[in-house]
Amino acid sequence: MKSAANRTSILLIEDTLSLQMVYRSILSSAGFRVTVAGTAAEGFQLFQSLRPAVVLLDLVLPDRDGLALMQDILAQAPDTSIIAITANGSVNRAVEAMRAGAHEFLVKPFDENRFLNAVQNALAERSRPAPVAVAVQPERPTLTDTSGFIGSSPAMGRIHSTIASVARSMATVFITGESGTGKELCALAVHANSARATGPFIALNCGAIPQDLLESEVFGHMKGSFTGAISDKPGAATAADGGTLFLDEICEMAPALQTKLLRFLQTSTVQPVGATRPKKVNVRIVCATNRDPLDAVRRGYFREDLYYRLYVVPIHMPPLRDRAGDVIEIAEAALRRFAEEEGRIFHGLDPAVQALLPRLPWPGNVRQLLNVIRNVVVLNPGGWVTPEMLPPGLAADEATPRPPRAQPCPD
């Protein structure tokens, strides 16, 4: 082991002097050659001259974001094994690092064995022979992860029956439910079981786009129609021609655009901003909201005629706390998927975790559960999922009050 390690150079980019000393000592004792940098600029310069096999990279550096530095390193040497290190145990940060190309992700503080195992695994991965390229037939891409749209509860059984009944029709589907309950997955299931399954599925979040840009996003625009319109752009309605257009958070749409959406539903034509002629499209509409749509109508936030045009087939996605029997099934499916993505081997949920998860209120619903499982997979090497692997404070959520069943419209 030591002779192999001696042939391997490691670059440590860490701005805390005390940690530099600790990490260098551990690695040197294991027989590795270690070069240390305290800033991103120094680290990148050393990387260019040394081309080390492994880079240990703190993501929080005084002069530059570590993720940006990681991308620059991998752009020059894609086969470099990078181990990202941070004191911030955010699952989003971990996922960003892994997706950016990190081989491993370590959260401070970590023990010596975990540290050395990460380095040795990175080296082992690097030393594996490259796979032989073979010709394969292109596969139809998977639309999205459907880990959250499973379950054997009576509520989910009714939803699956409704989808099976309406999927092949052209009827508009209106999905309601709290944030994170899986409304987009429900829309995908409607699309995937319809005659339009081979067509596009275009999702647009009406609450995430500034209202002055939303019309252009939905219907498109012509070059020069407004400042910044430097070229023609087809909107989501045109992109969804022959398929399904999913309008999420539909109740956040401004009244003026609601009028244009109603006209689109009545005529099946789109007219991009700045265009002189409408264009015929063949699109099925599925929409969703986390608000009470009737309350939005009563308060004047949502057009009544548009509501009745859209509210043909209602589907309500129940909160996860009301389908506790599905929690373990969802968690295990997510564990298998995320473990496969990250190249980890997990055996399953241990009994203590299986007892705990269904008791939690899950205010973030399925989305929160999936994030918890992703957190476990990204931040742990594998094995059985134990309570200690769960995010800190999760068990305390058992006493958290339940959130309201629907978001009221703002006064």
Image: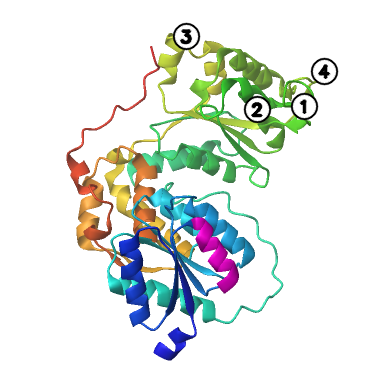
Residue range of the region highlighted in magenta in the rendering = 40-50
Q: What amino acid is at disc 4?
A: Thr
Disc 3 target residue: 300
43 in the magenta segment:
yes
Q: Are marks 1 and 4 in contact (CB under 8 Å)?
A: no
N-terminal label among 4 and 3: 4
Of the image marks 2 and 1, the number of the one nearer the N terminus: 2
Disc 2 crowd rating (10 Å Cα; few below 14, some 14-19, many 20+) is many
Amino acid type at circle 3 is: Gly
Q: Nearer the viewer, mark 1 or mark 4?
A: 4
Q: Residue furthest bottom?
A: 3
Q: Which residue sits at x=43%, y=53%?
A: 61
In the rendered structure, does residue 140 fall within the stretch colored magenta?
A: no
Query: Quarter of the image holding residue 293?
Result: top left
Looking at the picture, which amino acid does disc 1 mark?
Lys
Label 3 to label 1, Cα distance in Å? 30 Å
Tag on residue 280? 1
Q: Position of residue 48 (x, y in %)?
A: 59, 67
Q: How far apart are marks 1 and 4 (CA)?
A: 13 Å
Q: Quadrant of the N terminus?
A: bottom left
Closer mark to the observer between disc 4 and disc 3: 4
Within 10 angstroms of label 3, few (less than 14), some, or many (20 or more) residues?
Answer: few
> Residue 218's mark?
2
- State whether residue 287 is above or below residue 105: above
